[in-house]
Image (cartoon, rainbow, N blue to C red):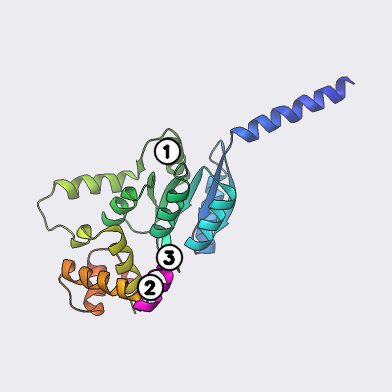
């Protein structure tokens, strides 16, 4: 009888511990990176990875089903990408904390994602200690940005040097510019974002005007120059 009572109390205690754990979903289109992040997260106390996704669309569906506390989100992925996925997830489940994990360390993406509602922004070379710090910070309802990125954001805001014209783009314009420079045509972008090709073209020429370019080739060159696109991804 005492043994059964002891076992029951043990199970209750175990359930209580599990209930305290914060759940995490990891989103990245590269399997090795996604698995690597998951392995790093095993060393972070009080959280558990409950799902993985390889695209923005998968992330939206998975978050809807699992309602995780935290989402580690890549930016550049096939389909709608991390920016739009973040916007849609937070529109539906604003209590979810999104930490962006990106190879991009310029000042355009962090500012844009934070404006979209992300709680954190770290680079893909972050180690376990930084990930722990990021998780602890956002669970305390505070914004976390990698130190080197935070310094860069401050410097870019204070400097008198040339400001990136990409900072003049709205979140939607930046997203469309990213999709266009990845090789998608207007019809493809329209289908991805579920808006009309006519609307896409309106946005595109507004982007041209803001960036001072006249065609997609010049747009791509500007995107490379100001860090929107990795040069290695441009053919």
Which quadrant would the N terminus be assigned to in this image? top right
Q: Kindly tell me whether residue 177 is visible in this rendering.
A: yes
Q: Residue at x 43, y 70 (%)?
A: 192
Image quadrant where residue 130 sits? top left
| Residue underneath mark 3 | 80
Please identify, in this view, whether the residue under mark 1 or under mark 2 is nearer the observer.
2
First in residue order: circle 2 vs circle 3: 3
Between the C-alphas of marks 1 and 2, the distance is 33 Å
Q: Is residue 75 above or below residue 5?
A: below
Mark 1 lies on residue: 138
119 within the magenta span: no
Mark closer to the observer (1, 3): 3
Where residue 29 sits in the image (x, y, percent)? 49, 64
**In front: 1, or 151?**
1
Q: Residue furthest left?
A: 160
Q: Residues within 10 Å of mark 3 (few under 14, many from 20)?
A: many
Image position, residue 124 (x, y; %): 42, 54
In the rendered structure, which segment of residues is drawn in magenta? 182-195
Q: Is residue 202 above or below residue 95?
A: below
Place residue 162 in its image quadrant.
bottom left
């Amino acid at each position: 009888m005492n043994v059964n009572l002891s076992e029951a109390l043990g199970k209750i205690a175990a359930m209580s511990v599990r209930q305290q754990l914060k759940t995490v979903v990891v989103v990245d289109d590269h399997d090795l990176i996604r698995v690597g992040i998951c392995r790093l997260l095993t060393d972070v106390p009080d959280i558990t990875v409950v799902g993985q996704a390889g695209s923005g669309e998968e992330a939206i569906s998975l978050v809807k089903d699992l309602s995780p506390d935290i989402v580690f989100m890549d930016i550049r992925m096939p389909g709608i990408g991390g920016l739009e996925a973040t916007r849609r997830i937070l529109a539906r489940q604003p209590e979810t904390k999104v930490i962006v994990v990106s190879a991009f360390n310029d000042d355009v993406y962090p500012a844009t994602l934070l404006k979209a509602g992300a709680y954190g922004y770290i680079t893909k070379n972050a180690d376990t200690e930084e990930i722990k710090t990021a998780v602890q910070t956002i669970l305390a309802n505070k914004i976390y940005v990698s130190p080197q990125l935070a310094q860069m954001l401050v410097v870019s805001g204070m400097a008198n040097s040339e400001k990136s014209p990409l900072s003049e783009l709205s979140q939607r314009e930046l997203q469309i510019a990213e999709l266009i420079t990845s090789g998608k045509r207007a019809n493809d972008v329209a289908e991805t974002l579920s808006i009309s090709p006519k609307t896409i073209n309106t946005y595109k020429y507004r982007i041209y005007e803001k960036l001072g370019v006249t065609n997609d080739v010049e747009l791509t060159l500007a995107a490379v120059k100001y860090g929107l696109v990795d040069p290695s991804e441009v053919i």
